Image: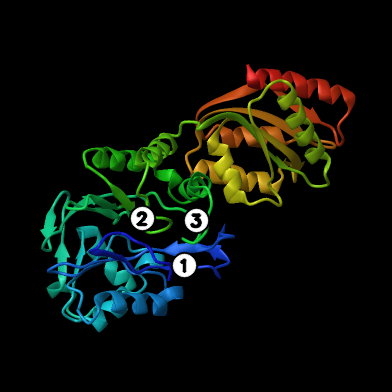
Amino acid sequence: MKDIKISEDIIYIGADDKTIDLFESQYIVPNGISYNSYLIKDNKNVIMDTIDRRKTDEWLENLEKALNGEKPDYLVISHLEPDHAYNIELLANKYPEMELIGNEKTFSMLPQFFNIDKIENRKIVVKEGEEISIGKHTLQFFMAPMVHWPEVMVTYEKTEKILFSADGFGKFGSLDTEEDWDCEARRYYFNIVGKYGVQVQALLKKAASLDIKMICPLHGPILKENLAHYIEKYDIWSSYKPENDGVFIAYASIHGNTEKVAKEMKKILEEKGAKKVAISDLSRDDIAEAVEDAFRYDKIVLASASYNGSVFTPMSNFLHLLIEKNYQNRKIALIENGSWAPSAARCMKESISKMKNINLCEKVVTIKSTMKSEDIIQLENLSEELLK
């Protein structure tokens, strides 16, 4: 286990997972993922969440080493998703005198996952703002429903001013990976939590009333410095504001002709002074990263081949994801390709109509099979409208 220093009384007992292929069976994690769990040692010993089944043995070894012969008094259950909660029943059986701390929704959902003997005698139900003293430390609980499950809560340790933030402020990547926090935290946020911006905003308002010196999430690094930066990012992301002035081009090309158009559009936009132009092949690139970039920039170009009287499947899937994640507050330009009956733009517009506060460019560029010189003129006109 990587030596993670929290404080003298709070010990990291989580584990890195570098062999996982897909997180939640859908997200590419080239640098793995961390499952974070913590032990607070005091007059009462408190475990802050368990971890995924993939690392049960390592977690138990870390826990027993940290306990050093003592027993846990409480298990705080922040979130019941199996990557954090898988070992609850195992732990409850191992330590039959340990009590479980959760909210009303936690214990209504718990039997769906586990069969814990005499649970009624072992549960402590906490409500908004309630506190539990464990000695030098005091735990205060705040509900965070739908960030991103209904039973989620966060815990504020009042003495050392630490926020145990559940999935909030989480990030892809193992803890021994040296990489920029913003990029993988952004990809994590928009793909996993992004639908629930309103709920995240509500949680940020609660956090604003607390004096926070450290954030301990359930995935990703412990945040100790420049906390204002991370909180600002979460405020931007959860309010669906563009983070950067730039253009994201997402294209879905069958035989490469639409790809050529998309790359020509990128060149034109750069020549016309766009501050940043990112581009993604929706058929081959990481779709989660495409979702991330769609939210990152204030403008997007959707370029797609027509297919089966509709829009090419990768673009259809991408638009479905954007709708799921509450995509809004952006300017969009459309490019379609069709050899006999172009249908992509019509179908993309139908999807866009389900999004909020979208500024859709009036001009649509229609390519007939391959790009011609007159098409380049149309792309230039569209780029001017997009950048205006």
- Depth check: give the residue in front, 12 or 155: 12
Question: Looking at the image, how many numbered discs can be counted on the residues?
Answer: 3
Residue at x 19%, y 70% (from the top left corner): 45
Give the label on residue 65, or none: none
Q: Position of residue 155 (x, y in %)?
A: 24, 54
Residue at x 57%, y 50% (from the top left corner): 288
Tag 3 residue: 172
Residue 76's quadrant in the figure?
bottom left
Q: Check disc 3 and report its element: helix, strand or loop.
A: loop
| Label 1: few (<14), some (14–19) or many (≥20) C-alpha neighbours in 10 Å | many
Task: Tell me which numbered mark, 2 or 1, is placed earlier along the sequence.
Answer: 1
Disc 3 marks a residue whose amino acid type is Phe
Rendered view: 176 above or below 262: below
Disc 2 marks a residue whose amino acid type is Pro
- Answer whether residue 115 is visible to the viewer in this image: no
Tag 1 residue: 16
Residue at x 52%, y 59% (from the top left corner): 177
- Depth check: give the residue in front, 287 or 68: 68
Tag 2 residue: 217
Task: Classify residue 251 as left or right of residue 189.
Answer: right
Residues at circles 2 and 1 in contact by the CB criterion of under 8 Å? no
Disc 1 marks a residue whose amino acid type is Asp
Q: Check disc 1 and report its element: helix, strand or loop.
A: strand
Q: Position of residue 46 (x, y in %)?
A: 21, 67
Task: Tell me which numbered mark, 3 or 2, is placed earlier along the sequence.
Answer: 3
Residue 250's quadrant in the figure?
top right
| Label 2: few (<14), some (14–19) or many (≥20) C-alpha neighbours in 10 Å | many
- Answer whether residue 61 is visible to the viewer in this image: yes
Q: Position of residue 98 (x, y in %)?
A: 18, 75
Q: Nearer the viewer, mark 3 or mark 1?
A: 1
Q: Position of residue 70 (x, y in %)?
A: 20, 79
